[in-house]
């Protein structure tokens, strides 16, 4: 698939944004900063918009998605927008029966636990996601146009980050039927029926890959693959049962051809996983531009474990958002110092923004990052 010169990387100069430059290994004048789950639960304006709609309905309302995605950009002054959606949206587009229950998360009406269940699900053509993704593409395009307006006001390009769930995390939800503390059923299937597991994660790689392609084709300037539950796997199991499918999902983005005017060879690829400190050397083999680090590993230690030239992202403990300002400031200063060990650094949290967070704390945090020139 060929992207055109109308893509925001060219038309809106997002290739020159702090986020994209840092993703590709440069150190811009200021360290870029954005927050996972910045678009959503912590913002009162978000809660007011969502008062009458379910999460999955909201994710398929282009005008609403655009507004929610832009809210933290306007309020906090972050350097990038993250597309407002949910990792199960492509599964909804594929026709699976899933609901997001308040206080619990995604719940599937028919869990996938046997070879027969896997055969039923994988019989669905992943291209259905593309065919049914018009609301997603519309939302991305609307959002990038609004970001262009915001960029003109700010005098700095603001890119949109697309995202999808990694195949292992999606498989864990499908097999468990919903959230789980230990993902025992998913880990059991890996060992009980490796062929069924491989078929399921291969199908999910295509579903996530198509979902990422849709977002980039419509205007996203980079993508991030979220593997929320990969940390439940031992390294050897991760290498055999999760890594191949993540690689396959990312190949869908690698296959996109950028226009000559983009001045870069590919759409930047990022990966974030929770509890993946012991997996970083394996994650590095995905040939990523950015690796997100959770709060359990220091950035300088993560760089050593990655042992490759890659930009690191993170990794402020979300709990510190509730600490006294001087404690938060000291932690941020430490993280900025640790980030010097990598070729470039993008400030973020070590997980998502908690819903109880005071939005003013995030705004102040962004301002403090931007007050610290990233002199090489």
Image: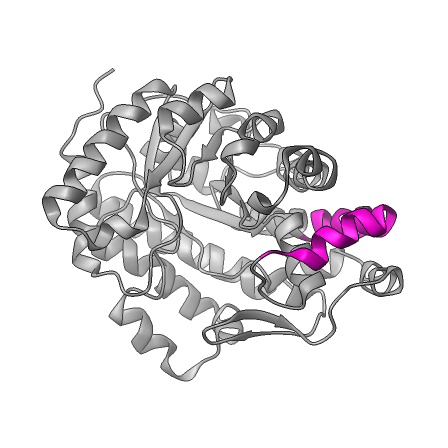
Q: Is residue 189 visible?
A: yes
Number of marks in the image? 0
Residue 192 in magenta?
yes
Q: Residue at position x 40%, y 33% from top?
A: 297
Q: From the viewer's perspective, tell me whether residue 62 is left or right of residue 117.
A: left
Q: Which range is magenta?
A: 182-207
Q: From the viewer's perspective, tell me whether residue 20 is left or right of residue 179.
A: left
List the single residue furthest toward the top: 376
Q: Is residue 203 visible?
A: no
Q: From the viewer's perspective, tell me whether residue 118 is left or right of residue 354.
A: right
On screen, 200 above or below 287? below
Q: Residue 291: x percent and y percent?
A: 48, 33
Write down the quadrant of residue 265 in the picture. Answer: top right
Which of the image's four quarters has the C terminus?
top left
Q: Residue at position x 26%, y 38% from top?
A: 156
List the single residue furthest toward the bottom: 52
Q: Residue 118: x percent and y percent?
A: 83, 60
Q: Residue 168: x percent and y percent?
A: 66, 49
On screen, 88 above or below 205? below
The rendered magenta stretch, by its main secondary structure, is classed as: helix
Which of the image's four quarters has the N terminus?
top right
Q: Residue at position x 43%, y 22% from top?
A: 303
Q: Residue 44: x percent and y percent?
A: 25, 71
On screen, 356 above or below 362? below
Residue 200 in magenta?
yes
């Amino acid at each position: 698939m060929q992207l055109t010169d109308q893509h925001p990387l060219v038309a809106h100069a997002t290739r020159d944004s702090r986020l994209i430059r840092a993703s590709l290994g440069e150190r811009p004048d200021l360290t870029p900063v954005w927050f996972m789950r910045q678009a959503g639960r912590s913002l009162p304006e978000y809660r007011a918009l969502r008062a009458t709609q379910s999460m999955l309905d909201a994710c398929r309302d282009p005008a609403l998605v655009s507004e929610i995605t832009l809210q933290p950009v306007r309020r906090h002054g972050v350097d990038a927008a993250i597309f407002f959606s949910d990792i199960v949206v492509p599964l909804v587009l594929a026709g699976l029966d899933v609901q997001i229950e308040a206080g619990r998360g995604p719940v599937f009406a028919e869990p996938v636990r046997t070879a027969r269940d896997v055969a039923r699900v994988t019989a669905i053509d992943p291209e259905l996601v593309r065919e049914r993704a018009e609301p997603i593409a519309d939302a991305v395009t609307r959002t990038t146009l609004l970001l262009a307006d915001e960029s003109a006001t700010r005098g700095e390009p603001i890119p949109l980050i697309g995202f999808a769930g990694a195949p292992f995390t999606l498989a864990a939800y499908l097999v468990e039927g919903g959230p789980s503390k230990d993902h025992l059923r998913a880990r059991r299937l890996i060992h009980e029926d490796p062929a069924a597991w491989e078929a399921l994660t291969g199908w999910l790689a295509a579903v996530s890959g198509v979902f990422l392609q849709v977002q980039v084709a419509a205007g996203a300037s980079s993508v991030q693959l979220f593997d929320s539950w990969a940390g439940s796997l031992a390294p050897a199991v991760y290498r055999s049962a999760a890594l191949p499918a993540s690689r396959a999902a990312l190949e869908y983005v690698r296959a996109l051809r950028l226009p000559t005017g983009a001045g870069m060879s590919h759409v930047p690829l990022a990966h974030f996983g929770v509890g993946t400190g012991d997996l970083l050397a394996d994650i590095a083999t995905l040939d990523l531009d950015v690796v997100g680090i959770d709060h359990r590993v220091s950035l300088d230690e993560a760089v050593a474990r990655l042992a490759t030239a890659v930009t690191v992202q993170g990794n402020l403990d979300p709990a510190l958002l509730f600490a006294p300002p001087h404690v938060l400031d000291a932690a941020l200063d430490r993280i900025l110092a640790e980030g010097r060990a990598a070729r470039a650094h993008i400030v973020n949290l070590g997980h998502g923004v908690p819903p109880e967070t005071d939005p003013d704390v995030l705004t102040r945090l962004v301002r403090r990052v931007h007050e610290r020139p990233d002199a090489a």
